[in-house]
Image: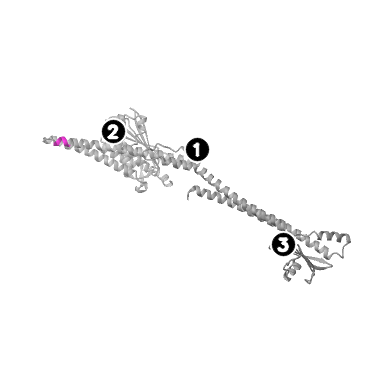
């Protein structure tokens, strides 16, 4: 069932319930008021009959004449009966059978007053004392006028209810369409968005209502998807280019070597060049595999409590093995007395890769013989690792792109590399709920700031 139909049915059902309750309430209280009013009139007739029949010999002629006038003001289809205490009929007027039973007369003598509804006929019985003896007065009538009025009221209420429901269904349908029109417009705009053109955005995102909030959320999701698609296209293009370069060099070297017989030193040179290109391919493949591993779900990566200072010393040692000429100046700031304050939650292998990549980048783009400053700062909630070089630096435009895989700034094109070190480090840091920030100035150097939440804060998360 469509939401539009469901809204219309729910709206109509609620209004129908309210109208039905209103109509039933009006009819019930109107009927109850009519019955009580007419019962009062019949009760007056019963007393008028008692005064006229039983009190005729005990009142003055003037009072008797007044009682007679009141008695002859009869009700429609009136029937009256007068009984003595022995249930003997003393007076009767009006045609019809009231179905008087000994049980009814006994009940009237006991209670003093009884009211009954027999189909459309109303009956009132009273106990009346005359000459210190109880008598029974029965009066009955049919409220023809008010019953007809009540019947007309019922017809009006039923007709009004049906007419109102027709109006409610029509207006409910219009209301549902109007309420869902913004959603239908959103659906129409979403259908126009496809993978080949992610630049379109929903126009409903300018308002403040729920539809606008939905559109804003969807637009933000499209922003993330567009960035992801662009990063994927850039990744595929750059990866293809990076893989093709050493492969092309290897193929060219081998083809030239096979064109004619050559001396052993020449073959050795070709093999050495091919081996270097193969090492580049292996490094690139390993980097791609590590990026895939760093992009996985953190729940699938084994984690443990790690000492930040030990991780940094291990990373420095590994960086010196890979680049013997690297110069590192390690400093500690705000060192706590409790070693647990230096603990983080993570995977030592992945974090080692991230820190070593940042150190190698700093060494690669630093001025020769310039030391790289490494500092660990203990803050209230985080452990901050800062790595600063004195290299060629980057422009603000290049800094915004450093985490795009295979991106390389214009001023480092002549320096060997693949542009996956910092993107890989970013993925690993985010996997550990940390953050990475790059600050750089051309010809003044670059600072990379890595922040990790402390171990006890990770447990709270």
CA distance for labels 3 and 1: 66 Å
User: Which numbered mark, 2 or 1, is in the foreground of this view?
Assistant: 1
Q: Residue at x 85, y 64 (%)?
A: 56
Could you say which quadrant of the image residue 408 lies in?
top left
> Which residue appears at 42% of the width and 45% of the height?
456
Residue at the spot of label 2: 364
Image position of 183 (left or right of 302): right
Depicted 40 relative to depicted 331: above or below: below
289 relative to 58 in the view: left or right? left
* Residue 56 located left or right of residue 438: right
> What residue is pinned by disc 1?
207
Main structural element of the magenta stretch: helix, strand or loop?
A: helix
Q: Nearer the viewer, residue 44 or 256?
A: 44
Secondary structure found at label 1: loop
Q: Nearer the viewer, mark 3 or mark 1?
A: 3
Q: Counting residues from the N terminus, which is met first, the one under dot 2 or under dot 1?
A: 1
- Label 2 environment density (alpha carbons within 10 Å; few <14, some 14–19, many ≥20): some
Left or right, 96 with reference to 418? right
- Observer-side mark, 2 or 3, equals 3
Q: Assess disc 1: are there few (<14), some (14-19) or many (≥20) residues with their C-alpha within 10 Å of its C-alpha.
A: few
């Amino acid at each position: 069932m469509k939401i539009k139909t469901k809204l219309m049915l729910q709206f109509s059902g609620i209004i129908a319930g309210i109208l039905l309750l209103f109509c039933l309430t009006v009819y019930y209280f109107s009927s109850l008021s009519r019955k009580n009013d007419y019962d009062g009139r019949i009760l007056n007739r019963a007393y008028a009959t008692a005064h006229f029949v039983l009190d005729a010999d005990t009142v003055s002629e003037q009072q008797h004449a007044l009682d007679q006038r009141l008695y002859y003001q009869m009700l429609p289809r009136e029937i009256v009966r007068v009984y003595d205490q022995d249930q003997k009929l003393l007076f009767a007027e009006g045609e019809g059978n009231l179905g008087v039973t000994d049980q009814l007369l006994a009940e009237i003598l006991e209670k003093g007053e009884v009211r009954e509804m027999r189909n459309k006929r109303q009956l009132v019985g009273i106990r009346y004392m005359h000459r210190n003896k109880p008598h029974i007065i029965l009066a009955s009538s049919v409220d023809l006028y008010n019953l007809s009025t009540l019947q007309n009221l019922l017809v009006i209420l039923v007709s009004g209810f049906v007419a109102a429901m027709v109006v409610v269904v029509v207006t409910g349908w219009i209301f549902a369409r109007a309420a869902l029109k913004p959603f239908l417009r959103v659906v129409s705009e979403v259908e126009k968005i496809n993978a080949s053109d992610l630049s379109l955005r929903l126009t409903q995102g300018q308002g403040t209502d729920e539809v606008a909030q939905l559109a804003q959320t969807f637009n933000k999701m499209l922003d993330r998807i567009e960035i992801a698609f662009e990063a994927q296209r850039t990744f595929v293009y750059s990866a293809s280019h990076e893989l093709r370069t050493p492969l092309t060099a290897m193929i060219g070297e081998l083809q030239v070597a096979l064109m004619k017989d050559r001396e052993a030193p020449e073959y050795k040179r070709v093999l050495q060049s091919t081996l270097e290109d193969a090492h580049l391919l292996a490094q690139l493949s390993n980097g791609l595999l590590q990026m895939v591993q760093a992009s996985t779900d953190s729940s699938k990566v084994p984690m443990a409590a790690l000492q930040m200072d030990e991780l940094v010393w291990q990373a420095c040692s590994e960086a010196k093995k890979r680049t013997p000429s690297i110069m590192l100046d390690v400093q500690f700031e705000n060192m706590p007395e409790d070693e647990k304050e230096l603990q983080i939650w993570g995977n030592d292998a992945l974090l080692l890769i991230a820190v070593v990549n940042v150190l190698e980048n700093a060494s690669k783009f630093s001025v020769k013989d310039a030391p790289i400053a490494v500092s660990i700062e203990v803050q209230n909630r985080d452990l901050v690792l800062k790595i600063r070089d004195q290299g060629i630096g980057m422009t603000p435009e290049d800094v915004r792109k450093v985490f795009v895989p295979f991106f390389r700034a214009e001023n480092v094109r002549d320096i060997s590399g693949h542009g996956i070190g910092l993107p890989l480090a970013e993925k690993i840091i985010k996997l550990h709920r940390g953050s990475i920030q790059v600050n750089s100035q051309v010809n003044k150097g670059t600072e990379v700031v890595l922040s990790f939440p402390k171990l006890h804060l990770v447990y709270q998360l």
